[in-house]
Image (cartoon, rainbow, N blue to C red):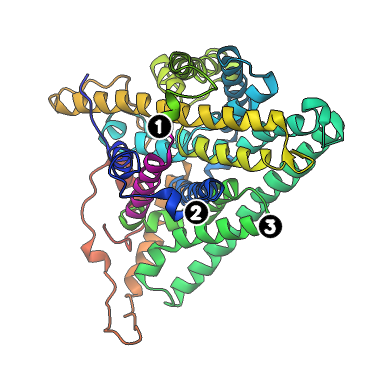
Amino acid sequence: LELALNSIVISLLAGIIFSPHATNLIKPLEYASGSRDDLGTVTLLFTRLVLGVQLVLAGVQLPSKYLLREWKSLALLLGPGMTFMWLCSSLLIWGLVPNLGFLHALAVGACVTPTDPVLSNSIVKGKFADKNIPKDLQKIIIAESGANDGLGYPFLYFSLYLIKYVGSGGAGQPGGVRLAMGDWFGEIWGYTILLSIVYGAVVGWIAKELLQRAQEKKFVDRESFLVFAITLALFIVGTCGMIGTDDVLACFIAGNAFTIDDWFRLETLDDSLQPTIDMLLNLSIFMWFGAVCPWGSFLRNDVIPIYRLIILGVLILLFRRLPIVFALHTFQWSKIWQIEQKQQALFVGFFGPIGVSAVFYLYVSLEFLRQITVGGVVRADAERLEDVVHGLSVPLGKLGYHLPRTLSSAMASRSISEDADEPRPPFPIRERIQNRSQLNHQRNGPRNSQRTREEPPRPVFRIGGSIIQSTTSENVVGLQTIDAATEIAPATSSRPS
């Protein structure tokens, strides 16, 4: 197989080259004033920022009311799917990591359970994805990766609360199982999950209404319009951080509510600004990972030998997700209609990158464990779990990303190099061009187009600058894909990238 390096791998390698391990041009510990705790806080906030922006953009990409229309498929992937991934990963970790309790294994398994939205977007987009992956399958993968990333909190805190109140006999943290389950249901499901869903939906809908009114009155220029989704993500990350709820899930819900009528998605369908910002954030976070990752501890640590670590990574890739996806595909009552064939089930089952989200939950765990103290000192079992979580989540995240991505890139290179007249995709593509949302746009298209022609764009006046004319619909060029052509047809006022 040909090895095809992509931009994320190159940025990770660049981070390693510029890190203190090599040329010492990037000095993360010095930037954190020499404090490793502050360095961990910086990494946590950086991952939170990247995930927030990525999840808003993921929500914006989905068609109108997609989460409501595909609730059954998502419920199967997020319910039994995530539960199986959590338990399977935890059992493998428990079996291969020496001297590790089962509750501790559950905490580590929860860190690698969510499917990373950053890496998911990089795999289900591009020439290989457009040629070989049906559009419906791409959408359900994006929706699942966005939703399950925010739903990783219940799996993580189930074990963390039990460790806090039950581990070591509850030393320093009295309350037992009853208080642990009370906090889990009240704080996690009630305050963190439900509040984030409601908050994200309300903020996303209000943002959509305000932006529509501003555009109708010509209060916003094209540049501000295009970057609005990014600012929405920053607002939600900041405000959710202030009230202490799940900003990751809130961002994804807000992105869906923001495009509940498909207006913003169609207006920015051909825009390149959002993908550019998305790419810059991806490259920055992986370069940072390359610089801060303790590469030497892969070989020298007190948690797990290197040979067991490699075996563990391979087993998690094979058994974490693949069996449950095949099981859902096998039984009639649990079939996911987007997965039509066994080859597609194999792809969805093997596909499940572990990356930024694993590092995010890693530092969330470390932040929680430092609060489990006895007499002002971190409890022994919590300190042991800190070492295990830090020693396992990062290497599993690297392996969980690079192996699937390398195989996908290699297949993409081979597929693109073949004769274009004789493509050989791994499974048949069945394009569903007209769904319910697109049919609604086709019915409303002539009316919207007529209104656009009757109201020519007004000039935008800027203080201290020149008059900038907006681009008219006459500049719209031909689209390259059938799916994009169907979706963009009603929105003749969109500007090409």
Who's the residue at 56% across and 53% down the image? 254
Assign a secondary structure to mark 2. Answer: loop
- The Cα atoms of the two marked residues, 1 and 3, are separated by 35 Å
Foreground pick, 154 / 100: 100
Who's the residue at 41% across and 41% down the image? 289
Residue on which disc 1 sits = 295
Residue on which disc 2 sits = 259
Ranked by sequence position, the earlier of labels 1 and 3 is 3
On screen, residue 264 above or below 50: below
- The Cα atoms of the two marked residues, 1 and 2, are separated by 42 Å
Who's the residue at 61% across and 33% down the image? 386
Q: Quadrant of residue 421?
A: top left
Magenta span dominant secondary structure = helix
Circle 2: residue type? Thr
Where does residue 290 sit, x and y in percent of width and height? 37, 39
Assign a secondary structure to mark 3. Answer: helix
Labels 3 & 2 near each other (Cβ < 8 A):
no
Residue occupying the far bottom of the picture: 464
In the rendered image, is residue 188 in sight? yes
Depth-wise, is mark 1 or mark 3 nearer the camera? 1
Where does residue 38 sit, x and y in percent of width and height? 54, 51
Which residues are the magenta region? 276-295
Residue on which disc 3 sits = 243
